[in-house]
Image (spheres, rainbow, N blue to C red):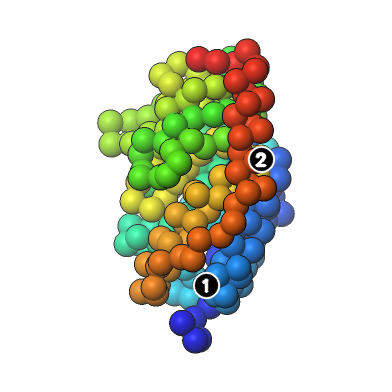
Amino acid sequence: MEDFVLRIGHLYPEQMNLYGDRGNVLALVRRIQWRRIAVEVVAIDAGSQVDWDSLAMVFMGGGEDSHQVHIAQDFLDRGPDLLPRISQGMPMLAICGAYQLLGSEYVTNDGKHLPGLGFLDVRTEPGKSRQIGDVVCQVEGVSLSPSTLVGFENHGGMTTLGREATALARVHTGSGNNGMDGTEGAVRQHVIGTYLHGSLLPKNPHLADLLIRWALEYRGQDAVLPELSDVWEGEAHQAMVNRANGSRRHR
Ligand code: GLN
């Protein structure tokens, strides 16, 4: 792995960065460095030039409606670069507002229709109230051990899965996609869309490692990762499970 550098494309780090989403990139970077693999984060802002062939994975966080409006056209314009790559196994983690824009359409709270890239067969419209609070869910859409994910949701959009969509997880505590069908997020190939902020990856290191393995595989590298001691991360994860179990947002 001498010359290999695992490059993470971070889409719209200024606009799409709510509730600690940037922490996901920090968690990926540290977990990659702890495996003695070189890593670089490439910020992708609206209008910036990107060497897509140099990237191993992509991250995009959540954003307020006004920020989604701001970057929506640029994101659509990047479809011809991004879509063929994620169709060929490039991993992407898309949180909340990013997840919404990977679907067919996001309708903002004040009625603006933002077309999405349509990679995930999901559509999002404004709900009657915002869904805010801790989420605990069981992953079903990918093989993950342990299968629990914890996070924090805060979204006005209600997402409906289309026939082609596979839910990422089943909600145990919280609302997830729409508060009605018990689903949370969506997954297709190695693209994960989810409502979980918080940051997600520091509290779910098993998901961080899955993304890193996918990124290494995508770049043709050895994807066997040495185990790390995740005592603190495990405690953070368990603390959230316990807190959510004590809350009244059970389904
Ligand atoms: N603006 C979107 C919504 O309210 C996304 C919010 C977010 O990314 N947290 O649904």
Q: Which mark is residue 6?
A: 1
Q: Residues within 10 Å of mark 1 (few under 14, many from 20)?
A: many
Return the residue nearer the eye: 11 or 141.
141
- Point 53% across, 53% down: residue: 208
Establish if 161 lies above or below 54: above
Horizontal side of 210 relative to 196 (left or right) equals: left
Q: Which residue is mark 2?
A: 236
Establish if 221 lies above or below 104: below
Pinpoint residue 79: horizontal percent, then vertical percent. 43, 57
- Point 50% across, 15% down: residue: 251
Query: In the picture, residue 164 is in which quadrant?
Result: top left
Earlier sequence position, callout 1 versus callout 2: 1
Alpha carbon separation for disc pair 1 and 2: 27 Å
Pinpoint residue 69: horizontal percent, then vertical percent. 62, 42
Is residue 63 visible in the rendered image? The answer is no
Query: In the picture, residue 152 is in which quadrant?
Result: top right
Return the residue nearer the eye: 73 or 26.
26
**Residue type at the position of mark 2:** Ala
* View extreme (left): residue: 163
- Secondary structure state at the residue bearing disc 2: helix
**Residue type at the position of mark 1:** Leu
Pinpoint residue 173: horizontal percent, then vertical percent. 54, 22
- Point 55% across, 70% down: residue: 35
Horizontal side of 109 relative to 148 (left or right) equals: right
Q: Residues within 10 Å of mark 2 (few under 14, many from 20)?
A: some
Q: Which mark is residue 17?
A: none
- Point 52% across, 72% down: residue: 6
Pinpoint residue 4: horizontal percent, then vertical percent. 49, 81
